[in-house]
Amino acid sequence: MRNIDRIYVDGKFVAPHGVEEFKLFNPAKGEVIGKVRLGDEQDARRAVAAAKRAFPALSRTSKAERIEMLRGLHDAVAKRTADLLAAMIEEYGAPRERASWMVRYAGDAFLNAAKTIESYEFTRRIGSAEVVMEPVGVVALITPWNSNYGFICSKLGTAIAAGCTAAIKPSEMSAIQTDLLTECLDAAGLPDGVFNIVNGRGEVVGAELASHPDVSKVSFTGSTAVGKSILRAAADTMKRVTLELGGKSPTIVLDDADIDTAVCLVIDAGFQNNGQACINGTRVLVPKDMLDAFLPRLKRAVESMKVGDPNDSDTVLGPIVSQKQYERVEGYIRAGTDEGATLITGGEGLPEGFTSGYFVRPTVFAGVTNNMRIAREEIFGPVIAVISYRTEQEAIEISNDSTYGLSAYVISSNRARAEAVARQLQTGRVSINGAPHDPMAPFGGYKQSGIGREFGVFGLEEYLEPKAILGATGF
């Protein structure tokens, strides 16, 4: 049993002022494995004050100094790879292969931030003005539980690259992972107050950070509903806001796609990260004439996926993160049946042979129309909905008929055709034929999937303010 009774403020592990205790679970077993003492509003204010004190010095550092800091953070995280991996598997339930990638991704986020600023010009001449890109100030970084290390490291890396100091509120459900990662970040030896980490509830610590007058920017990843509340709270002090929110991403299988290849890519897009990713391609659009060949192969492939212990190297799908999330996903599976969709495989209840843990049967519905709840609302679990279409234009229209616009996937044997379809989709990112994540390309959403962008130069400039100096003599 782990008992986490510390937060990180001004370069030190300290006891929180808050007294509430929150239970931590192993989702594969459904058992309590620890508890965390949560911070409160006073702890959030302490974190902001420390970041405010550290900001003047960090904002004046050179590009070379910040690159050195970022490389040091990468090295400190890399030294604890095995420990970070074990904690993520135990507390989150990510399958070993996926968790290994997520741990590497977290450390590499600091190198990507360093690479971004290596060639970035913070001072440039535009017309008769000297334009200086200055750090916005103290930033609040609010991160979710479905990739705890990755979100903390990518947001913090970008903030430091820009010269900003940070107050971080991770998910309380990831406290074991957070505590271990904080040890790594502390070992990098950054100046006190550059980053501060407070475990706490969103409606307590998160709300305080979003409304605090000394916070100049909020970067939040999570649900659209919470994102809207942060936007409202930030308005009074005109904070800069980056919101990476929910999604209901389409996967368009074009009629020239190889069916076996398409099935593999549909599974990868729909079920990655135990179905708990905002980018998951959970609306699968298939030509009506292809359904009879496509659905049986998809059914066989899904039923061959190993659901089980995330520590096993051959496990493809681990558990949902919590009992609450499990019940939410089960509710959507019931809703799909109630609305008249055809259950192809999966369904309610634990998978066969399971008596405990928050495991969901990987579920596929067909006969889905785009007005059903399972086609319009983010489920955040291993559930995909197959929607048929007759023409390419209809597929594009169905894809765009959503309040979300975070990601999309196009599968075709004709790359030029796939690119033409991709250009017509109202979404922040489109992956063609399973193209992998590019950490330097912008990431963010259209419509209610968010505001602003993360990663690379586009993400960096979310943390910078341009100052135009007129009449400057040059530089």
Image (cartoon, rainbow, N blue to C red):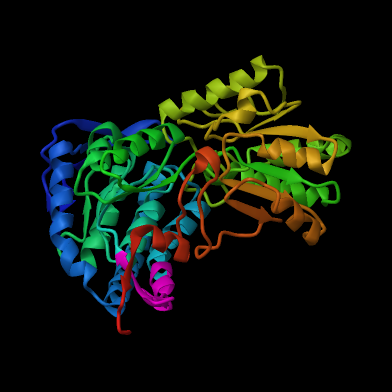
Does the magenta portion include 130?
yes
| x and y, in percent, of residue 192 in the image | 14, 62
Judge whether 377 appears above or below 9 on screen. Answer: above
Query: Is residue 33 toward the left or the right of residue 352 in the image?
Result: left
Query: Is residue 22 toward the left or the right of residue 87 in the image?
Result: left
Does the magenta portion include 178?
no
Location of residue 30 (image quadrant):
top left
Could you tell me which quadrant the C terminus lies in? Answer: bottom left
Q: Nearer the viewer, residue 215 or 38?
A: 215
Specify start and end residues of the magenta stretch as a single range. Answer: 112-134
One can see residue 305 in this view: no
Residue at 30% across, 79% down: 472
Location of residue 181 (image quadrant):
bottom left
Q: Nearer the viewer, residue 164 or 359?
A: 164
* Residue furthest to the right: 289
| x and y, in percent, of residue 263 in the image | 74, 46
| x and y, in percent, of residue 18 in the image | 14, 35
Residue at 67% across, 24% down: 371
| x and y, in percent, of residue 143 in the image | 36, 46
Residue at 59% across, 52% down: 429
Q: Nearer the viewer, residue 45 or 292?
A: 45
